[in-house]
Image: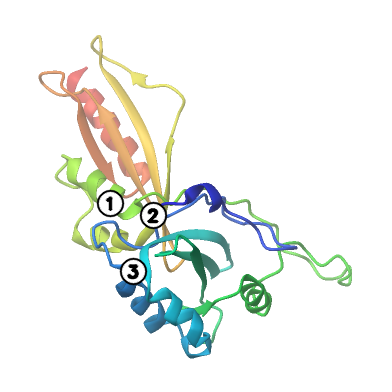
Amino acid sequence: MHPQGDMQQRAMPGEALSVPYETAAYEPPESPESPEEHLARLLGRALNSFELPDETLRTLDRALAHDSSLHSAHHSAGLHRETYRHTWLLSDGSVRTLWELVHNTAPGREPRHEVYADEEELRAATARLPLPRETPDFELPVTVQLAPVTAPLHSYLPDDSADHARRLLRRAENPDRPGADTAALLTTAFAHEITQAFGHPCRAGRAGLFFSLYEHAFLLRDGEEVSLWEVEHTATPDGRHMCEVYVSEDAAREAMERRAAQVS
């Protein structure tokens, strides 16, 4: 079931989304689960699953299919909060929803999972989290200097991001491409954004030679942001298209300079 039409992102009353998400499959597409398995795993990681009504759990035992999507998110100063909507299709054609709250605001910053049967309960639980305010408190004394607010660098979209990272690294042909550690880290990516580093391909040297540079920015489940830099070019002996991937923009641009010099 993919009822994405009614699963658009919504900010909770009085809050603004700090990351412009759309919708996302929360579970890895390469690991399909039955509705019963999905429910069991959700309840197993939630600290408050014992608070759910027994009737709700009995109803979900009759589910035919399920779907999960990112509902809203907030990332600020190393703290993060995401809410997920888990929906089950029942045999009578009706739909039941559970709301999952994931955050790292407890001591130790370890991710915590909570689950709620009612969206109002979810809002109340979210309001209790000690997250930084979205806007400065203008009633503070004028002697207090507020830190400048930094705009988000990326607009992430959840879209099989871990698989995108795998495919990007697999097609890289440079010997010094990111290794196993980076690949393992990116298995936890759940949102990403691709941007071209400059507006038009860079052409130099022989006719038809071009270079393009792209940043692939990934958002990990612990709130960390990781970027890979992709160089696409035709600076090969036979003029074929080649992809190289680097862990920094400087390394990628240096590679472009080397390739251009080799064929100039």
Q: Which residue is mark 1?
A: 163
Element carrying mark 1: helix
Q: x, y percentage for residue 43?
A: 41, 81
Element carrying mark 2: loop
Compared to residue 218, the image places residue 199 above or below, namely above
Q: x, y percentage for residue 15?
A: 70, 62
Eye-nearest disc, 3 or 1: 3
**Which residue type carries mark 2?**
Met
Category of crowding for the residue at label 2, using alpha-carbon neighbours closer than 10 angstroms: few (below 14), some (14–19), many (at least 20):
few
The answer to whether marks 2 and 1 mark residues whose Cβ atoms lie closer than 8 Å is: no
Colour pattern? rainbow
In the picture, measured across the screen, residue 191 lies left or right of residue 83, that is: left
First of labels 2, 1 by sequence position: 2
Q: Which residue is mark 2?
A: 1
Q: x, y percentage for residue 182?
A: 26, 59
In the picture, measured across the screen, residue 168 lies left or right of residue 128, that is: left
Q: Quadrant of residue 29?
A: bottom left
**Which residue type carries mark 1?**
Asp
Compared to residue 36, the image places residue 156 above or below, namely above
**Which residue type carries mark 3?**
Pro
Q: CA distance from mark 3 to mark 2?
A: 11 Å
The residue that appears at 63% across and 51% down in the rendered structure is 151
First of labels 3, 2 by sequence position: 2
